[in-house]
Amino acid sequence: MKFTYFALSITLAMALGLTGCSKPDAPATLAQPYETIAAQAKGFTVGALMSAQTVYVLFDPQCPHCGQLWQASAPLQSRVKFMWIPVSIINAKSGRQGAALLSAGNPVEAMTAHEKSILAGTGGMSAPDSVPRDIELSIQKNTALFNSLGADSVPYILARNANTGLVVSNTGALDTLALAGFLGIAAP
């Protein structure tokens, strides 16, 4: 049993070293509480919608590490509710793609196709040049929230660990096993 926890700890430590897509001149402050994101962010929800455990993921649609996290989270979606919150830090296409995802009739299907394209190196979904003003403002507010949290790269994950009850944050992609450990849930 100790070996399993040791192996999980080593895996988690190695996974936390995975990189993310960084923005220039990132602030060095720590993340503010989980409740700030819950109250202010606009995103789309996937997974166990009735779950008491919500995981907030701030992501940039142009980030391949975010695509890796999207895929890694899929096996955990039957037990956890994920809220994916688009921000725009990489380039102008980020905001338009984030708006397209928020506006999609089925954002989960749109995100799956988008991330598959990003990971294949084909640039992701096409997005209109003009975005409805309310959606554009939502992306801007999400980005301002991301900046206020002191996060320096995406994906940025904020959750309450199911075992400890503590709010935990992570910058960068995690594989499924490391993500489960980070969230305090059993690996699939």
Image (tube, grey):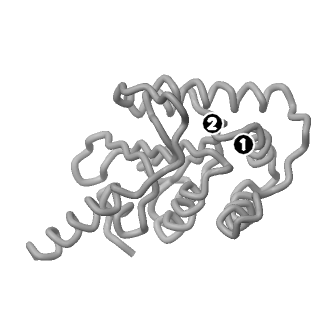
* Side of 43 where 12 appears, left or right: left
Q: Residue furthest front?
A: 24
The quadrant in which the C terminus is found is bottom left
Query: What residue is rendered at 58% in x and 45% in y?
Result: 59
Circle 2 is placed at which residue position? 89
Pick whichever, 131 or 78, lies toward us. 131
Badge 1, how many Cα within 10 Å: few under 14, some, many 20+? many
Query: What residue is rendered at 67% in x and 50% in y?
Result: 62
* Kind of element beneath mark 1: helix
Tag 1 near tag 2, CB within 8 Å? yes
The quadrant in which the N terminus is found is bottom left
Badge 2, how many Cα within 10 Å: few under 14, some, many 20+? many
Pinpoint residue 162: horizontal percent, then vertical percent: 30, 52
Q: Which image quarter: residue 114? A: bottom right
Circle 1 is placed at which residue position? 94
| Comes first in the chain, label 1 or label 2 | 2
* Side of 161 where 52 appears, left or right: right
Pinpoint residue 78: horizontal percent, then vertical percent: 50, 66
* Side of 143 where 110 appears, left or right: right
Pinpoint residue 150: horizontal percent, then vertical percent: 43, 28
